[in-house]
Amino acid sequence: MNCPRCNAQVAFVKDRCDNCGQSLKNHRRIVSLSNSYYNQGLNQAKVRDLSGAISSLKKSLEFYKMNTNARNLLGLIYFEAGEVVSALSEWVISKHFQPGDNDADKYIRMVQADPNKLEVYNQTIKKYNSALFSAQHGDGDMAIIQLKKVVSLNPRFIRAHQLLALLYMMTGKKDNRARAKRLLISISKIDVTNTTTIKYLKELSDVHLRGEAAPKKVSEAPAAESRKTLPRVETDAYKQITPYKEEKPSILPFVNVVVGVVIGMALMGFLIMPHINSAKSQKANSEFKKYSEQKAANDSDVSTLKTENEKLQKELNKVKKENEELQGGGGVEGGATMQESYEYLVSAIQYYQKKDKEKAAKALAKVNPNILESNEAKETYNKIKEDAFPVVSDAYFKQGRDAYNGEGEYSGRKDYAKAVSLLEKALEYNEENTDAMFFLGRCYQQQSDSEKAKEYYNQIINDFPRSPRVSEAQRRLRELGE
């Protein structure tokens, strides 16, 4: 099972992700429900209950859309029912969610291996759509001709068989009704519980095919009364089912429509439109008020930034002036000299004014704070350090975490040595970065350096008892035997 937040591999029995700490109880419950519906659909498919299987698998995907097993099986069922386009759609989606080690690749290659057969599938879809259009517009004969071609090209296309059977039934001819029954019996073996097929077969229950047991004879009058088949109609009469083509249109419905339109327009003019205009006016006033407040806030922020920039510029000019007066001087404890420290401080201020906190922090790290003489320089140093150092520390921590997990630029390879180097830099810039401490402990634990790992875990527990990493550090210490 993968974590829904960080996509890390997690054991199914775990309640929390080891990598990001995400709670997995609800996610596990959803995945379990999805798998239950998948198992139900699989059992239904085994007994050729394709309609029930499609319903179960769709519910499985509603709970967890990344259940590729359910999606692949749904594609297979669509393919079995002649719905090749729907099958390919499910397999392509499945491949998107699981690019590697996915049976969908095999199924897609199976369909695409024969371009001629794929073209036949495309032609059947086009002919089916054309036949459906003809049937909807009353041209049943043309629809029958097209559908006969469709079912010959794709004998498992259930919907095409059902539409052709319906058109045969609508002709009312005995031989056509027999043809309809044969079509329905053939596809009932593909999907044994298809409700449309069962309904049509029930309508044809009085049709007797060769080889079937003859139905019991009853008197003609009751048979005519209990007949379940569609009435015998002419082909041209089928076109008259479409609306807006009644033989004797009445003027009264037209008058009612006109009166209704007039009343509706009157109601809109007197009741609805004033309300709409009022709502628009209130919305416009509200938006203008928000704009005015935002503009005032922006103006205030600009003014504050200008003041702060002027202050920093004065400090920079003062530092530059002091730097020009310096002649160098020995460094303290092997650090940078006074002149070098002030030069680094000037660079840090320039980067900070440009809002490049990372370069500002790296320049400030070269400054020897013990050699700074003026209070202004020390205050500037501390201000930039407090603002920029945590940013750089967090950046080094994220790079180190990626190297430890094998993610980001280290995708596919875990580099513990590089992770240690980056995480140590994170601590150089922020000694209170407990995230970096924890992952340093994890790196040394993975490298079998238990003593070093315990050192970092104990540092989190003893020095930062309120850190959210304390419980994890305690658990790792128990793993190491403490």
Image: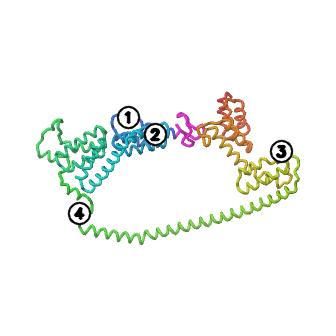
Give, as a three-letter code, the residue at label 3.
Answer: Gly
Which residue is more in the foreground, 269 or 203? 203
Left or right of residue 383: residue 163: left
Q: Mark 1: give few (<14), some (14-19) or many (20+) Cα within 10 Å.
A: some
Q: Secondary structure at mark 4?
A: loop
What distance separates the C-alpha of mark 1 from that of mark 4? Answer: 50 Å
The residue that disc 2 covers is 68
Which quadrant is home to the C terminus? top right
Does residue 327 appear anywhere in the picture? yes
The mark that comes first in sequence, 4 or 3, is 4
- The numbered dot on residue 246 is 4
- The Cα atoms of the two marked residues, 4 and 3, are separated by 100 Å
Q: Earlier in the sequence, mark 1 or mark 3?
A: 1
Q: Horizontal and vertical percent for residue 214? A: 15, 37
> Is residue 438 among the parts visible in the rendering?
no
Sooner in the amino-acid sequence: mark 1 or mark 4: 1
Q: Amino acid at mark 1?
A: Asn
**Front: mark 4 or 3:** 3
Q: CA distance from mark 1 to mark 3?
A: 75 Å
Judge left or right: residue 30 versus residue 212: right
Q: Position of residue 175 (x, y in %)?
A: 17, 45
Count residues near mark 4 (Cα–Cα under 10 Å), then give few for <14, some for 14-19, many for 20+: few
Most common SS among magenta residues: loop
Q: Which residues lie in the magenta part? A: 1-26
Q: Residue at x 28, y 68 (%)?
A: 254
Residue carrying label 1: 43
Query: Please, what secondary structure does the residue beneath circle 2 have?
Result: helix
The quadrant holding residue 71 is top left
